[in-house]
Image (cartoon, rainbow, N blue to C red):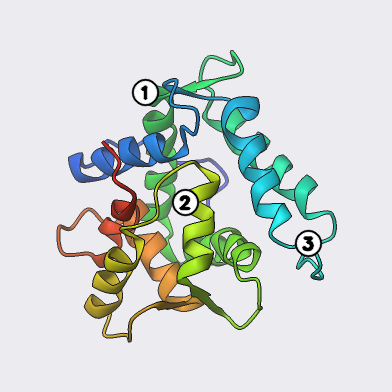
């Protein structure tokens, strides 16, 4: 993401972001065993998300393989001791360099977010209209084994804070919320609530 040849040194993380990353770790921990593994957490999610496209033309060739490769890459990147699994400490620590890179070159980082998070948006957007419906978000949470009852209220709170109508999450708003969740420690950022609708501990 950065324009410099050498990657930035890892930055200390604001406490607000550490709290969010720990919640995100819990969200991704599908089997609840306190670690992220491909077999226990991400392979079942990839299969669920790919299955939603049955009977439709997928937005990417071999969608299941793309999802599996993406999850494999991300888990490997976060696996600090290379033991094939990621604990909460490794997950949080892996974000220090990402946070430093964002602060070094925010515009380049936003290009990366648009490509990576935007690609995931496309995976969830079954009808391809550039807007995620509540059922798209619920399917994502359900793939990780989470309840979905609180998603609508949480989404609409964020949309209201962005000055948008309820129940529909446009692509640009999604990218804004993702950026805020990962990188904006301010307590007033609507994106801080991105994963608050699924009752995580």
**Dot 2: few (<14), some (14–19), or many (≥20) neighbours within 10 Å?**
many
Which of the marked residues, 1 or 2, is nearer the chain's N terminus? 1
Give the distance between the C-alpha atoms of the residues marked 3 and 2, in whole angstroms.
Answer: 19 Å
Quadrant of image for the C terminus? top left
Secondary structure beneath dot 3 equals: loop
- Using the image, tell me which numbered label, if any, was put on residue 141: 2
Q: How far is mark 1 from mark 2, CA to CA?
A: 23 Å
When asked about the image quadrant of residue 190, the answer is: bottom left
The mark closer to the camera, 1 or 2, is 2
The image shows residue 134, relative to residue 147, as above or below, that is below
What is the quadrant of residue 175 in the picture? Answer: bottom left
Task: Give the quarter of the figure containing the N terminus.
Answer: bottom right
In the figure, 92 relative to 5: above or below? above
Q: Which residue is mark 3?
A: 54
The residue under the point 39% across, 48% down is 147
Decide which of 39, 10 is in the foreground and name it.
39
- Give whichever of 77, 130 is nearer the camera: 130
Asked whether, in this view, residue 91 is left or right of residue 159, the answer is right
Residue with the mark numbered 1? 89
Give the percent coordinates (x, y) of residue 90: 43, 24
Q: Residue 132 location in percent, x, y?
A: 51, 73
Instruction: Locate residue 117: give its quadrant.
Output: bottom right
């Amino acid at each position: 993401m950065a324009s410099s040849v050498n990657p930035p040194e890892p930055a200390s993380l604001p406490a607000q972001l550490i709290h969010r990353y720990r919640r995100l770790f819990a969200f991704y921990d599908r089997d609840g065993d306190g670690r992220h593994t491909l077999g226990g957490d991400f392979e079942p999610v990839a299969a669920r998300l790919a299955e939603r496209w049955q009977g439709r033309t997928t937005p990417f060739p071999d969608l299941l393989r793309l999802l599996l490769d993406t999850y494999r890459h991300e888990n490997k990147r976060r696996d600090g001791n290379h033991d094939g699994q990621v604990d909460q400490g490794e997950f949080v620590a892996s974000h220090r360099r990402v946070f430093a890179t964002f602060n070094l070159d925010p515009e380049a980082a936003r290009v990366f977010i648009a490509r990576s998070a935007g690609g995931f948006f496309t995976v969830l957007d079954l009808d391809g209209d550039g807007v995620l419906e509540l059922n798209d978000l619920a399917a994502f949470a359900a793939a990780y084994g989470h309840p979905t009852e609180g998603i609508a209220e949480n989404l609409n709170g964020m949309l209201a804070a962005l000055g948008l109508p309820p129940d529909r999450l446009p692509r640009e708003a999604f990218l804004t919320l993702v950026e805020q969740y990962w990188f904006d420690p301010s307590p007033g950022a609507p994106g801080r609530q991105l994963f608050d609708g699924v009752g995580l501990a």
